Image: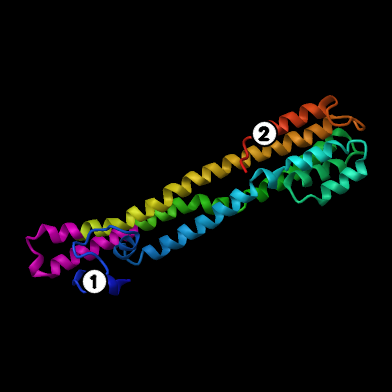
Amino acid sequence: MSVMLLANAGGLNPGVNPAGIVETVWDMVVKGGWMMIPLGVCSLVALAIIVERMILTSRERVAPRGFLSAMQGMRRSPRQALAAARGERSAAGAVLAAVIAARGEERVQREKRAQDAGERQVIRLRERMRLLSSLPQVATMLGLLGTVFGMIRTFTVVAASGESLGKTEKLAQGIYEAWTATAAGLAVAIPTLVMYHVIMARIDAAARVLDETAQAWIETPEGVVAGEGAEGIGAGAAAQGLAGVES
């Protein structure tokens, strides 16, 4: 990268426009210096985490509507419901399996088991979110560091070259090239920060759905089928909560 920058400064690289204007993404990568490499790594890591978390927090991965509807019809068959919940790979399946398995225990114990199971699922949904939350700051700092290095290099070249004395266009060109690293860092940081808060909102919505789904089974007496008593209310609450988790 440094070799390419020296070639550009000497007018030896025909791949970059002679005016030195940043017109394409490749121009930005070249003029941003070697700091663009860790910024590129940050952007790839952020993209991978965002895609993965968006999939895992989708409605069908948290509490599939088909599964919840099928479970409502198994209220009179606890063993069948337990087998179905254990065979379901969604977060709601794990929570309902814990609730149904504790059906012979007191209400306090059932609520405790549901809470523990729900917390485990929320922790699983929040995996790598701490790393994602740190990437905006890291990208911004890397961009600023690249700019500082670029400014140092620019003033060093200007000070060492007698031909550059009194020519402000030479200094201006070096300065805007140095600030390219900061622009790239912000370009990575801003979308990553936005997506972090979007995913955290989806996780909060998923937690509400899991809690409402578990409470519907805990509060409904055994033997009540779908649409009767508290189960119908719980299903409606879960459906409203699912609206916050987009597929």
Spatial CA distance of label 1 from label 2 is 57 Å
In depth, the one of 65 and 198 nearer the eye is: 65
Residue 233 x, y percent position in the rendering: 77, 26
Q: Is residue 118 left or right of residue 32?
A: right
Q: Quadrant of residue 58?
A: top right
In depth, the one of 114 and 20 nearer the eye is: 20
Q: Is residue 150 left or right of residue 206?
A: left
Q: Quadrant of residue 173?
A: bottom left
Work out which quarter of the rendered image holds the N terminus and state it: bottom left
Which residue corresponds to the image point at 34% horizontal and 59% vertical from the top-left?
A: 25
Q: Which residue is mark 2?
A: 241
Residue 216 x, y percent position in the rendering: 80, 32
Asked if 137 appears above or below 63 in the picture, the reply is: below
Q: Which residue is mark 1?
A: 14
* The residue stretch that appears in magenta: 145-173
Tell me, yes or no, whether the highlighted magenta stretch contains residue 183.
no
SS for tag 2?
helix
Q: Quadrant of residue 151?
A: bottom left
In depth, the one of 243 and 174 nearer the eye is: 243
SS for tag 1?
loop
Kindly report which numbered mark, 1 or 2, lies closer to the viewer in this rendering: 1
> Does the magenta stretch mainly form a helix, a strand or a loop?
helix
Asked if 77 appears above or below 182 in the picture, the reply is: above
Kind of residue indicated by mark 2: Gly
The answer, for residue 144, to whether it is visible in the render is: no
Kind of residue indicated by mark 1: Pro
